[in-house]
Amino acid sequence: MTQRADIDPERSIRERIAHDLRYFRERNDLSQTDLGDRIGAVKQYVSGIERADPRFNLQEGHAKAADELWGLPGHFLRLVRAVRERSEEDWYAEHLPLEAKAEELFLAQLGMLPGLLQTEDYARAVMLKATGPASLDQGLAERIERQRILARPDPPLVFVLLDEAALRRVVGGREVMIGQLGRLVELSRLPNFSIRVVPFSVGWHPGVTSSFKIMQVKGRRHAYSESTGGGRLTSRPDEVRHFELRFRQTGEEALNRDDSRLLLSSVAEGF
């Protein structure tokens, strides 16, 4: 079997699935099309899984079919379920390449401002509280690197929904907040940006349960959600549609772009 050199089954569960699926397929002299026919999938899906492409996730039904096909006692099914239970750090790292390549970004944020939009001073204050000084320099460098997506020759379309609480929560002190809110006002004037705020007067809204982002890459959408139980990345169309609905419903409660910009400026002046 000729395995791709960049697939390391010890590095992640996704790469273990990629490695093992190809191993059993080739050992049984099946093409990707043949395997797709046997488990009820298409060649592109099988190919994506064998490349460990984060846009393609082995589904439980296909995992069970592969186990039955090769007489494996729940091997692929256990791996698929392990992916769902893995740590927030794994999901976070996996969503970053999608974010970097996105043509469109939809950001819904609650108590803090999105990392992509943070000034260096705001990000420093957040990281000092969250992780302490030991990893501060590395964390700041990584955040600045992520923000380079906004300076691409073909920058993404960015649609942002913020809860008013994120604007008024003091992070790093008065000067830091003035600089950060000024940055948001500047971004809101760019033609590829839409920043809208859900005001306190709305009360409860669909976006208050968790922060999340939707990333569109090559016409396909992926969603990354944050919660107290840990972050999670999904490319399943039904799950992505759930986040699209929440974004749309939250947007219905938000101020328009001009009124949101006025609120941003007003809050900054209040500091």
Image (cartoon, grey):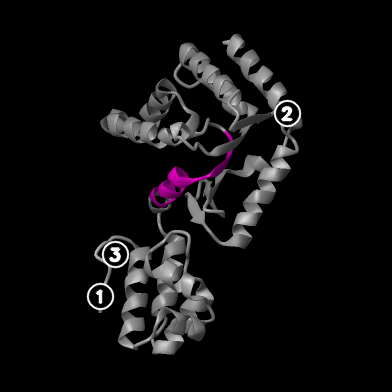
> Which residue in the protein does label 1 denote?
2
Foreground label between 1 and 3 = 1
Upstream in the sequence, badge 3 or badge 2?
3
Residue 138 lies, in percent from the top left, at: 29, 34
Between residues 218 and 28, which one lies in front from this camera angle? 218
- Looking at the image, which residue is at 51% across and 71% down? 59
Image-quadrant location for residue 7: bottom left
Residue 83, x across and y down, in percent: 43, 63
The residue type indicated by label 3 comes to Ile
Q: Decide whether residue 100 is among the magenta residues.
A: yes
**Which residue is denoted by mark 3 in the rendering?**
7
As for residue 213 lying within the magenta part, the answer is no
Tell me where residue 64 appears, x and y as whole percent.
Answer: 48, 81
In space, the residues marked 3 and 2 are separated at their CA atoms by 46 Å
Is the C terminus in the top left, top right, bottom left or bottom right quadrant?
top right
- Eyeballing the image, is 99 above or below 43? above
* Distance between the alpha carbons at the discs numbered 1 and 2: 55 Å
Q: What segment carries the magenta color?
A: 93-110
* Discs 1/2, front: 1
Amino acid, disc 2: Asn
- Mark 1 vs 2: CB contact within 8 A: no
Mark 3 Cα-neighbour bin, 10 Å: few <14, some 14–19, many ≥20: some
User: Which residue is drawn at the image coordinates 42% and 79% (left, top)?
Assistant: 32
Left or right placement of residue 73 versus residue 64 in this view: left
In this view, the residue farthest toward the front is 153
User: Residue at horizontal 62%, vertical 15%?
Assistant: 265
Image quadrant in which you'd find residue 124 = top left
Residue placed at 70% from the left, 38% from the top? 251
Give the residue type at disc 1: Thr
* Residue pointed to by mark 2: 256
